[in-house]
Amino acid sequence: MMENSQETKTLSKLNLDRPQDFRFHIAYEVYSQAWEDNTSESVRVRLNELVSSLGNSENGYSAFYGQIGKYRKDLPSFTSGNTRIITQRKRAWQESDTKDRRNRRYR
């Protein structure tokens, strides 16, 4: 009787960090965070492919960040539209700050 010996590979995080290369080190930190956030094996295989291809090419950082963006949880979503900036005169800010401090002091 022949046994079917299927090896179950345990997927592990690649240890390619190069602290002396700042750009690669930051990209590796992004990869590490994405690795910890995703538990799916197919996603982790793709993350390993992305970071290993980054180690082979010099100009692939923009492509790396473009492809890893969908696997990141800490990346805020882009919202388009006009943003309103509210300004305040220095004197008005000082008055409101003084009032807030006084209220905190006597609570």
Image (cartoon, grey):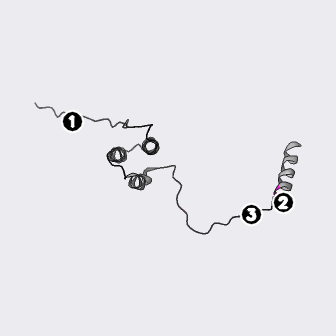
Residue situated furthest left in the rendering: 1
Q: Residue at x 84, y 59 (%)?
A: 92
User: Where is residue 79 drawn, in percent x and y?
Assistant: 55, 63
Q: Indicate the secondary structure of the residue bearing disc 3.
A: loop
Residue occupied by mark 1: 6
Q: Quadrant of residue 85?
A: bottom right
For the N terminus, the image quarter is top left
Would residue 56 be found to the left or right of residue 38 on screen? left
**Label 2 amino acid?**
Ala
Q: Is residue 84 magenta?
A: yes
Query: In the rendered structure, which disc, 1 or 2, sits on the residue that comes first in sequence?
Result: 1
Mark 3 or mark 2: whose residue is earlier in sequence? 3
Image quadrant holding the C terminus, namely top right
Counting residues from the N terminus, which is met first, the one under dot 1 or under dot 3? Answer: 1
Give the numbered dot on residue 87: 3
Residue 92 is marked as 2
Q: CA distance from mark 1 to mark 2?
A: 72 Å
The amino acid pointed to by label 3 is Thr
Residue 40 appears in which quarter of the rendering?
top left
Which residues, given as a range, are shown in magenta?
Answer: 77-93
For mark 3, does the 10 Å Cα neighbourhood hold few (<14), some (14 to 19), or many (20 or more) residues?
Answer: few
Q: Is residue 107 visible?
A: no
Q: Quadrant of residue 105?
A: top right
Residue placed most toward the observer, 72 or 59: 59
83 vs 26: above or below: below
- Above or below, comparing residue 80 to residue 3 in the picture: below
Dominant secondary structure of the residues highlighted in magenta in the image: loop
